[in-house]
Amino acid sequence: MKRIFSGVQPSGNLTLGNYLGAIRNFARLQDQNEFDCIYCVVDMHAITTWQDPAALTHATRDVAASFLAAGIDPKTSIIFNQSQVAAHAELAWIFSCTARLGWLNRMTQFKEKAGKHRENASVGLYAYPVLMAADILVYKATHVPVGEDQKQHLELTRDIAQKFNSDFGVEIFPLTEPLIFGEATRVMSLRDGTKKMSKSDPSDYSRINLIDDADTIALKIRKARTDPEPLPETVADLEKRPEAANLVGIFAALADIGRDEVLKRYGGAQFSGFKSDLADLAVEKLQPVSGEMRRLGDDPGYVDAVLRDGAERASVIADEVVVEAKRAVGFLLR
């Protein structure tokens, strides 16, 4: 059986980008019955930068609620939060002794997140790609759904798996393959089409939050930045028009059609009518999810029970893999 592992970080409001780029696809992969699916709220990754403890607890439940609201069945798939399964941290240490400094020095996301204050960044922020590799390989995941910005980390995961297997003469860890989905796998800011939609952007108008109500979604789309020209007529014409490309990509993803099909309908038209239709489409697709998230937010006991049950099931798999790794390294076991 092929196995999927993926996770979402609980560090603020979930956005349309999180939904289209990851969460919606999680449910679809589960429904294909081709994969054994494991979905994680990666709260250990969240604390690579300081988090308010109460806010982290709330955000962890919110991410779990988004999984459930998107249609992930906790009986069919495993849903859990990372910190409840100690095997992630154990394997991450072993992999820290396998990975090379040169590999981590090439990770572009650390440079972007640390910025000019690199010396003040946490060790965790620098080393978190190693923890990501452990997250994936502790379940021997064969496939990981990734966006363009995570491909480098998956390549590191493959390097670590290959080196560990080679160093110890074993075949424990697979060379995990990426799954990259279609339109709008990378959703950009509604205020700047050259920047990724982010829950940390100071402007709430830069993003659509999954918990936004219908009026707020429509308002944000109406106010989304565009250029003065009509919508282009071909996909090639989108290349130099980032705001147009972003809105067309969002429409395509929500409607499950290609960008070329969107432009067949709207190419040459003014943005006002297109935005109105996009707002209607976004409200239609997102309101069932946001409504269910709000309902689950009022029942934290149920969400916590789902996470506990998932952690128990995940630990059964992960603990066995860690034992294999420890035995290969030469650790004495109980």
Image: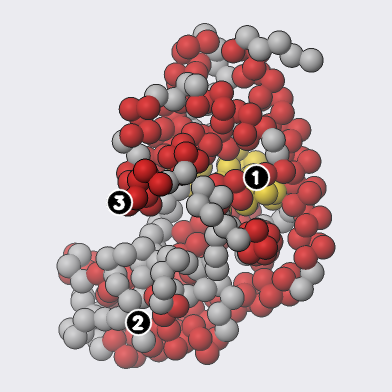
Mark 2 closeness class: few <14, some 14–19, many ≥20 residues within 10 Å: many
Residue type at tag 2? Ala
Q: Observer-nearest residue: 187 or 299?
A: 299
Earlier residue among tags 2 and 3: 3
Residue at numbered disc 2: 224
Residue at numbered disc 1: 82
What is the number of callouts on the image? 3
Q: Is residue 65 left or right of residue 274?
A: right
In the picture, the disc for residue 116 is 3
Residue type at tag 1? Gln
* Residue shown at 62% from the left, 34% from the top: 89
Mark 3 closeness class: few <14, some 14–19, many ≥20 residues within 10 Å: few
Q: Are marks 1 and 2 in contact (CB under 8 Å)?
A: no
SS for dot 1: helix
* Residue shown at 51% from the left, 86% from the top: 216
Distance from disc 1 to disc 3, alpha carbons, whole Å, reads 30 Å
Q: Is residue 284 left or right of residue 318?
A: left
Q: Position of residue 140 (x, y in %)?
A: 59, 30
Q: Are marks 1 and 3 in contact (CB under 8 Å)?
A: no
Does the rendering let one see residue 45?
Answer: yes
SS for dot 3: helix
Q: Quadrant of the C terminus?
A: top right
